[in-house]
Image (cartoon, grey):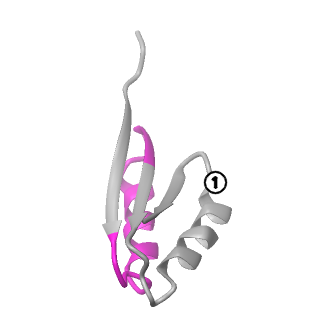
Amino acid sequence: MEKNKYSIIIPTFNERLNIALIVYLIFKHLRDVDFEIIVVDDGSPDDTQNVVKQLQQVYGEDYIVCISL
């Protein structure tokens, strides 16, 4: 039986201080779930995109995708 894969979409704007906690909690509580996190950043001036890039290095680019608008 094939396992489902889920895409979790997180829209962000100035979420530099929150995005790491959100990603951590997703990984903590969805251990047995196949998922990817898609972060959609709307050009945050607070450097949210760079924090997401750091999270990609920690968790892997296969699990976290960053789309910048």
Which image quadrant for residue 51?
A: bottom right
Residue beneath the point at 51% across and 60% down: 66
Residue 44 vertical placement versus 35 (above, below): below
Residue beneath the point at 54% across and 49% down: 63
The residue carrying mark 1 is 60
Which of the two residues, 37 or 34, is positioned nearer the viewer here?
37
Residue beneath the point at 54% across and 70% down: 52
Q: Quadrant of the C terminus?
A: bottom left
Label 1 sits on what residue type? Gly
Write down the region rendered in magenta: 12-36
Task: Identify the residue at the far top of this view.
Answer: 1
Magenta stretch containing residue 24, yes or no? yes
Residue beneath the point at 38% across and 72% down: 42
Whole-percent x, y for residue 19 in the image: 41, 74
Whole-percent x, y for residue 12 in the image: 34, 72
Q: Residues within 10 Å of mark 1 (few under 14, many from 20)?
A: few
From the viewer's perspective, is 12 left or right of 52?
left
Whole-percent x, y for residue 4 in the image: 37, 26
Residue 47 vertical placement versus 9 (above, below): below
Which image quadrant for residue 13?
A: bottom left
Whole-percent x, y for residue 15 in the image: 37, 81
